[in-house]
Amino acid sequence: MSERAEATASTEKDSIKFHFQLQRDEFSLDVDGSFSGRGVTAIFGHSGCGKSTLLRCIAGLEKPQIAFFQVDQSVWEDSSQSTRLPTHQRPIGYVFQEASLFPHLSALKNLQYGQKRCGQSQNNDQLEQVIDLLGIENLLHRKPDRLSGGERQRVSIARALAVCPQLLLMDEPLSALDMKRKREILPFLERLHQELAIPVLYVTHSPAEVRRLADNLVVMDSGKIIASGKLTETEQYLDDSHLF
Amino acid sequence: MLTSADYSALWLTFKVASLTTLILLILGTPVAWWLSNTQSRWKPLLSALIAVPLVLPPTVLGFYLLVLMGPEGALGRFTDAIGLGTLPFTFTGLVFASCIYSLPFVVQPLQNAFEAIGPRPLEVAATLRASPIDSFFSVTIPLAKPGFFTAGILGFAHTVGEFGVVLMIGGNIPDKTRLVSVQLYNHVEALEYTQAHWLAALLLGFSFLVLLVMYTVIKTPLRVQHV
């Protein structure tokens, strides 16, 4: 643990602390460290390095053998105490790689699905804000199969925000889109970055997205964290990664 | 045209098939859900048990049900003890036997539908604060709708077509257990070919129509949508 602690030098500002160990047939995840409670932290690495698995652990979608996760003072999961919040009780927003909108519901009903269930159903200002932030007011009454890939991803980002999360998790939200759609969505992500007060964990394998969106960087390889810190201090890893 | 005995048999068949379908949709849903999610080592055993009526001669199934429901059978003793009497040659007995007979026709389409949905929509629902039971009703069931439709239609149509099981445990009691397939058999036995033609044509038309509706409404049955 001590050698890793050095690599992931946690500063006192970091309010999100984690430790996960997950063994699978061909893969193991073993991470221990902290994230900043502010801004966008990119989790970066080539495919198969465990970055999405880390995000799924944080959301409670995986069951690691050893797990600890804490945001500020509240512990979401601690396998040594056998405490574990199920996913639906964690105050997160999650954006999946492909938009995963419910096909049987309109865009608006998709937004309201989570909003209703987190006790925000009266809070229409908040919903309007999210709709405005992602520029989807014209899409609300369409079913997902009537939306383009980029529009679907914007609706699903809005849906994740409509539950008023304390932590936003984004798993390669642009990777399923072509260049044109990426360029269409990036400005909205930059707006999120500027306007959101909550911390965002953003999984990506694209150095360009990291440079454009992230404040902090966590670099992963083979299920381990090999560097973490402010983007200004860790940026050299983005280019190193081409060697992988 | 049809005689009043024919109408009575048709009406009775409709009642048995509707009730059977309803019961199977309610009981088959949790079974299919469990089968589609479990990695238990009991899964092949249960799957095989449910599928047995697909390959078993209906008379064999009817024979065992007759023994089971009879006064010396385990089920017969139980129904007798709770004051229902024994089930062979009763409407209840017919519905019970039909449920066993048509079980795979309801469970398998449901199981396929649940499996086609996959884990992702339920993970999404969980990140949107839906508990597992909540997401079953708000996501799984709406997405599995074509599966429920297929299961209902196949369960109903298959029950209408049962013959061997009915003969074994239902007998041939007019207005009580004489279903349309048995009524058709009676007409042929009595050389009433005109009557037999009417009933047979009706059943053929019904079966074809049911399948036509199914293939029209569900153009792409059980399609997974990743949107």
Image (cartoon, coloured by chain):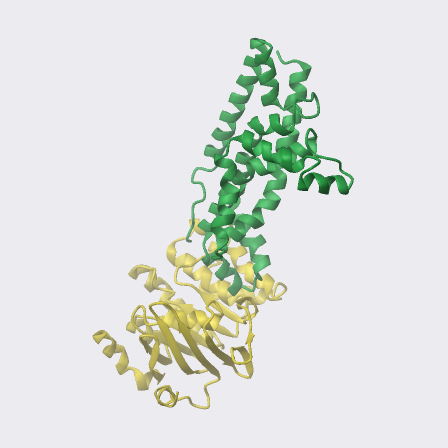
Chain colours: A yellow, B green
What is the quadrant of residue B191 in the picture? top right
Where does the image place residue B28, in percent across and percent down from the top left? 57, 45
Where does the image place residue A128, in percent across and percent down from the top left? 54, 64
Q: Nearer the viewer, residue A137 or A216?
A: A216
Where does the image place residue A2, in percent across and percent down from the top left? 38, 90
Q: Nearer the viewer, residue B149 or B166?
A: B166
The residue at the point 59 percent across, 58 percent down is B133
Where does the image place residue B194, in percent across and percent down from the top left? 57, 9
Q: Nearer the viewer, residue A115 or B46?
A: B46
Residue B19 seen = no
Task: State which quarter of the image contains the C terminus of chain A.
Answer: bottom left
What is the quadrant of residue B13 in the picture? top right
Residue B116 seen = yes
Q: Is residue A211 left or right of residue B216?
A: left
Whether B203 is drawn above or below A179: the answer is above
Whether B35 is drawn above or below A83: the answer is above
Whether A159 is drawn above or below B4: the answer is below
Q: Residue furthest right?
A: B83
Number of numbered discs present?
Answer: 0
The residue at the point 57 percent across, 63 percent down is A115
Task: State which quarter of the image contains the N terminus of chain A.
Answer: bottom left
Whether B84 is drawn above or below B8: the answer is below
The residue at the point 47 percent across, 46 percent down is B112
Q: Residue furthest front?
A: B72
Q: Nearer the viewer, residue A3 or A233?
A: A3
